[in-house]
Amino acid sequence: MGRHLVPDQGGSGLVEQWLPFTCTLDCGSRCELAGCVVDGHLMRLDTPPGPDELNAPRLIPCARGRAQRRWLTAGNRVGTPWLRDRGVLKRAAWSTALDYAAAELERVRTTYGAPAILFASGAGGGGGRGFSGAYASERLFSYWDRVTHTTGNLSHHCASWVEQLMLGRSVPGSDRLTLLDAQMVVLWGNNPADTHMGAHTEHYLRVARDRGTLVILIDPRLSDSGALADVWLPVRPGTDVALVAALVFLLESWDAVDRTFLERCTAGYELYRDDVLGLTDGVPKTPAWASTITGLPAERIEWLARQLVERKPATLLPGWGPQRAQWGEQFHRAMITLACVTGNVGQPGTGLPGVGSGEGGMPLPHLPSGPYGPARTLHNGSWAQAVLAGDLHPPLKLAFIAASNLVNRSSDTNACLRALDTVETTIVLDPFLTPTAQLADVVLPINTDLERADIISAWGSADGPFDAQQVTTSPDEAQTDYWVCAELAQRLGIGEAYTGGRTAAQWLAEFREIPALAGLQERAVLNRKRTPRVALADYCADPLAHPLPTASGRIELASYAALEAGLPLVASFVPWDLDDDGAGYPLHLLTPHHKLRANSCHAGNPWLRQIDQQALWIHPANAAARGIADGDRVAVRSPQGVLHVSAYVTERIMPGVVCLPQGAWFAPDTTGIDQAGSANVLTSLDVSPSGGPTTHSVRVEVSRVAG
């Protein structure tokens, strides 16, 4: 749907105008939205009309997308620049704020060197061609100098690392349409009802289940995706690899492994088999062995193994949560291994349990980058640890933060606060006064998706792109990232290089002339109908003609590179060293994504906060032992910190496990105790062997707050 007008039917003289746009939230999807504008005022948001076809269904937004109009009047919205004066943030003119920011950048570069400047981004809005989100700021530094950058993926680090280890490259996941070919789908630590994990995932799961596909949810908690499933199999966090070993033990015992596939397409299976059968360590990985570890009864493990034998093809759909853990690499190694053992790779209805995102849609033009890359990089998951260690030369003196609520989305919030306190100047670009922005010396107000035009790329298995039009005007004086960075570039002496002599509107006009984008303005989104992609189909059909870029040319189920990284040779279970040992933290904490937030985005949206309040999920047995009733205010403690939040007492979570969704805005009281339930107060800076975050490897204690 492109821009169109609806004639006035009531004689009022007002014309209803519908303008298409899309949100750029990092939520696991990208959806179609339209704003209804009457007499210049945005009245409501809705889903554009259009046909729904099996091969090209509409991209219907969730509550997060529909709630964006509430952003416009949120009390935490930043409409004008802010500058810190004698410790207090005060409103300032754009020229004053920009002059100050540019002068500080130049001062720090001259005094300490450009590497003393940290450019930090990630987990905020973005997805355009450089006009919105972090890329606009990244381009600024690419034309100016080599500064320090944050890097690394907080979402799927271990899964990506495992793909390189076992497959030699990143492999796009199968199109979600192929779920309709599956006889069984296993959502393994995957919650598409909340996080989507690719456009249409939930839609095709519903259609497949209606057609008779068995859907199984394996998760320590009964998430909202339980509504998509026939069976819930709860397992203790971090024990999935033991469950996989028991399944393969049974398949071997029944002579039900796909030996043809293993011999044609994999290398190293015999080493994994020996581990499972106990030939390596003398411990057969039987269902009884796995039951004591996972908490899942042995008969349920045997039932699941029977389903893998009887229901083919089957799709294993792992989420990203289980791999954000102490031994997160082993989870994804086990997922790929199980798919290979059962032959569920390379055919419609199977898929490949890797990162899982698709090709990312049509290739789109990007604004050019300058000659300067990073001087050095700090990992997004442990940047605070690097700063606090005191080993950086030169040390960081200025933080430039764009499209990121840095102290909120990073592990160990208190460590992030201490790290940010070591710099002399903090500059934040954001539409909202987030916990990070509240610590800044200068806050530069940025538009939301409603208030700017852009061409937006797709997410995951959707094609896109989207022609997002400006739906409403900005409150006060908020501007686009592109405008802000162009103004800074002018003050830093690189204005012409940054803009190429063009405004954002002129760049967009050029992009729309590209043949691949023909018709985009009229239709607002381009979705191609094509043969559904099946991951590794060519390789599995003829491994010799399409070898993988691994040492063997095959899927490597055993890896000496893993040994070098501190991991086992195969996807064997490694007991976590997180047992309580009398330390006073007996409960295992999960910190998944929230269904009404995208990381910390929307945490300040008052409408969504009314729909679903932040709360700690706790099993009735654990609650009763602590004198906690549903709705009580509780204190949650870990070695890293303490917070207060309401309790949600429910049988939808396993005993011994508690759950606090991440992303709530950090809000300490006068004693420093967070009152919002900001989960990263509790997480640590520890990383997995390959350097991934371990936010799901946390032990806590919970107690009722008196009074």
Image (spheres, rainbow, N blue to C red):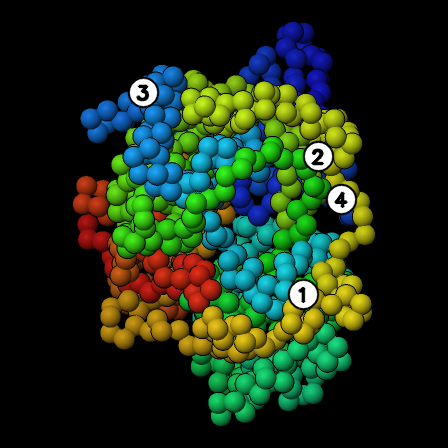
Q: How far, Cα to Cα, is label 2 from label 1?
A: 35 Å
Earlier-in-chain disc, 1 versus 4: 4
Q: Which is more foreground, mark 1 or mark 4?
A: 1
Earlier-in-chain disc, 1 versus 3: 3
Q: Residues within 10 Å of mark 4 (few under 14, many from 20)?
A: some
Q: Residue 135: image x %, image y %?
A: 53, 37
Cβ atoms at labels 4 and 2 below 8 Å apart: no
Q: Residues within 10 Å of mark 3 (few under 14, many from 20)?
A: some
Query: Which circle marks residue 549 in the picture?
Result: 1
Query: Which circle marks residue 100 in the picture?
Result: none
According to the picture, the residue beneath numbered tag 3 turns out to be 91
Q: Which is more foreground, mark 4 or mark 3?
A: 3
Cβ atoms at labels 4 and 3 below 8 Å apart: no
Q: How far, Cα to Cα, is label 4 from label 3?
A: 48 Å
Asked if residue 288 is positioned above or below residue 545 in the image, the reply reads below
SS state under label 1 = loop
Q: How far, Cα to Cα, is label 1 from label 4?
A: 33 Å
Earlier-in-chain disc, 4 versus 2: 4
Residue sitting nearer the eye, 149 or 73: 149
Query: Which circle marks residue 525 in the picture?
Result: 2
Name which residue type carries label 4: Ala
